[in-house]
Image (cartoon, rainbow, N blue to C red):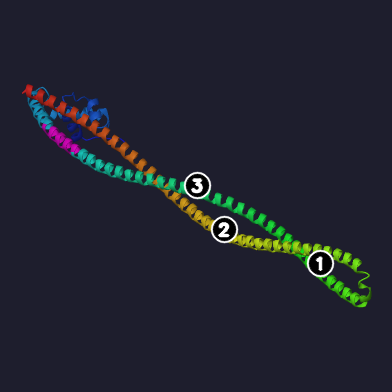
Amino acid sequence: MARSGVYKSEVRQARDSLLAQGKNPSVDAVRIALGNTGSKTTIHKYLKELEEDDGGVDDHKASIGEALQDLVGRLAAQLKEEANHRVDQILAQGADKDKRHAETTAALRQEVAALSDNLQRAEATALQERSAHEHISEELQNEKIIRHTLERQVIDLKERLAENDAHRQSIEEKHQHARDALEHYRQSVKEQRDQDQRRHEQQVQQMQAEMRQLQQSLIVKQDDVTRLNQEGARLVSDLSHAQNALYDQQSRNRQLEQKLEALQAIEQHAKAVEARLADKENQTRAQKLELGAAIAKADELISQVRNLELALATADAKLAAQQGVVGELRTYLETRATSNAKSD
């Protein structure tokens, strides 16, 4: 907010400043130099008083010109010195900022490279784990197929075992029937011999008369005996075959038991593979989480690098602008110095 009034000393200082710049110290110019403060009437009054105090502008025009020239020269020298000092400070600050920015950028690039390597290694590890997981899944699938096949074989073997047990039972029943028939034959033969013996004792007197008939009966009996002996031999052969079949069935049963034990071992191996697969899946999840964290950190670092690059570009633009201003200032000072030298 502008002040309500100005002092005479301020009007004098503003007038002298305008004169030093080679400008006409009019009421408006002085008021602008004072920051648009004070009334024009007051400024005009103070300017009149200052002219009266100085004894008129026309009488002291030469002395004012010399004073202004000296003041301009000293101000130009001081301004040039301050500008050079300021330019040196700006250049030093710019060089220091460039150095710090270069160091920060190099460190960030190294960190980004390290994170990129870690990310690549993590991706390679994840790929290997994925391949191993797929391989283990294939092995597990194959194991399941083999287990299913073996279970089907076990079921088939159990069915065959049941059939063989039924066949063995049938053979044992046939064998029992054969033994019963053989025993019955032996008993009948014994009874027949006893009957023949008794008949022989009772019919000694009739033996010769009935010799021909007995011989014929004997021939018939011999044929029956031969037939029964053949039947007994056949039954013995069937029994031998049945025993061999029983031995074969027992051997197959032992083989089935071995296969069942192998199937149990395979099932245990499949359970172990499933446990390893679960561990691999847990490790894969953990590595995926680590990979996501590394990617997030890499993205954050890349964002920081971009921000730093943007800040560096902004600083470079500011430095270029400052250098342009310094160049223009130097050109202006050199021009003023040349003009002053020519005036001298």
Residue 260, position as x, y percentages in the image: 60, 60
**Amino acid residing under circle 1:** Ala
Choose the circle earlier in sequence order: 2 or 1: 1
- Name the residue beneath numbered marker 1: 181
Q: In the rendered structure, which segment of residues is drawn in magenta?
A: 77-91
Label 3 Cα crowd, 10 Å radius (few <14 / some 14-19 / many 20+): few
Mark on residue 267? 2
Q: CA distance from mark 2 to mark 1?
A: 51 Å
Residue 6, position as x, y percentages in the image: 24, 35
Q: Where is the N terminus found, in terms of image quarters?
A: top left
Q: Which quarter of the figure has residue 163? A: bottom right
Choose the circle earlier in sequence order: 1 or 3: 3
**Amino acid residing under circle 3:** Glu
Q: CA distance from mark 3 to mark 2?
A: 20 Å
- Look at the picture and state if 20 lies above or below 97: above
Is residue 160 in view? Answer: yes
